[in-house]
Amino acid sequence: MVPGGRDTTVAVAGCDGYGAGEVDAAVRRAVDLAGGIGRFVSPGQQVLLKPNLLQGQEPGRCVTTHPAVVAAVARLLAEHGCRVVIADSPGGGIVYSEANLRRAYARAGYAALIEETGAVLNYDTGSQIVSFPEGEVMKQFSIIAPAAEADAIVVVSKAKTHMWTRMTGATKNLFGLIPGLEKPVFHFRFQDEYAFGRMLVDLNECMKPRLQVVDAVMGMEGDGPQAGSPRKIGAILAGSDCSAVDTVLARLIGMDPLEIGSIRSAAERGLLDPAAVRTVGDDPAGFAVPDFRKPSTYAGGRTGVWRRVMLAVVQRFGRTYAPRPGVIASSCIGCRKCERICPVHAITVREGRAEIDLSRCIRCYCCHEMCTEHAIALSRGLTGKILAHLLG
């Protein structure tokens, strides 16, 4: 436990694959170990079930929360007497419309969940302003209507690396409550991943999800959250505290939790002591993947005085070190997702092809994240390659 009575216990349940029976058993076991579903929600409540939908991709790509995990949590909530609404706002390059929601739900395999779980899919594209005067960097948020109106929120996230935040799990998943085309504003305002992490902590403290479940059966390694590769971890995680759950997840994929901006922010605020996070259930060491491939923007690795000096150089000359996005002309279809999401308007589409003004680019990689055609490549200049080699 940490100040304020926050429970930083995280349940770990092994799950070898996505067979419905196996997933259902693992989810139930993890939630029971975390205290049981009745600890988090009450019968009769309307519960928002928040998966990682991104733009909607077929489950085998490991971009989205697997539908078997979403279904298992939905069934558990329905059996407890809750009314379940599955909702998310697709990634920031997507217009938040009913048509786009329908496509994303169908691609991710969620449209098929309705009959078997009794849950409903959200098509309300309205939003509300939610005040949060206690926020450190945000005093209010624009939140999608089904989340603002829900009695409780249950987050069902996906274990992935992330080009911008290094890792996306429980805490980052709540960013999907921000309506689609409003997301670039946050990337413009919080251009450092640690500043972005502080905002994410504010968002989670504002909306206060009751329960966190992480689909870490298969994760995404490399250049996530969309362009990476599937990698088996073999576990379901559950707990009430997003930062504690992310602490366990970070260790499973070979990252220092305090490298993650949101975890560091929670620790600095006294909301979390990573050393005090405990696990119940299966031993997480049995699922750890120390060679989990990090994103190409990752500056982790060796420790010591020399590396700290080099990291200071990287922070001072971040644009030099950071990979630069570039358009693969033969793959670009001119869909304008990258143009819409760019927070600094550094991308324009001319004659059906995207063009990037690197002098304006802030290296947030939103364009890379949103490109379903993999038409945005990342590369470093010579100085950046030297720094990356020294830090590797």
Image (cartoon, rainbow, N blue to C red):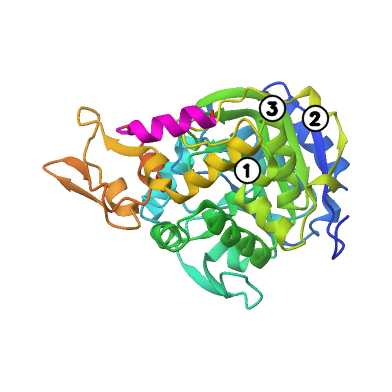
Q: Amino acid at mark 1?
A: Gly
The boundaries of the magenta stretch are 375-391
Q: Is residue 6 above or below residue 32?
A: below
Q: Could you tell me residue 19's position as x and y percent? A: 68, 23
| Residue 110 seen by the camera | no
Q: Amino acid at mark 3?
A: Ala
Q: Are marks 2 and 1 in contact (CB under 8 Å)?
A: no
Q: Are marks 2 and 3 in contact (CB under 8 Å)?
A: no
Considering the image in quadrants, where does the N terminus appear?
bottom right
Residue of label 2: 284
Residue of label 1: 169
Q: Nearer the viewer, residue 13 or 101?
A: 13
Element carrying mark 1? loop
Q: Which residue does the image show at 44% across and 64% down from the upper left?
A: 189
Q: Which residue does the image show at 20% across and 27% down from the upper left?
A: 330
| Between marks 2 and 3 in the image, the one whose residue lies nearer the viewer | 2
Q: Could you tell me residue 138's position as x and y percent? A: 56, 70
Q: From the viewer's perspective, is 61 left or right of 338? A: right
Q: Is residue 285 magenta?
A: no
Residue of label 3: 20
Q: Is residue 337 above or below residue 384?
A: below
| Residue 360 seen by the camera | yes
Q: Residue lying farthest left? A: 351
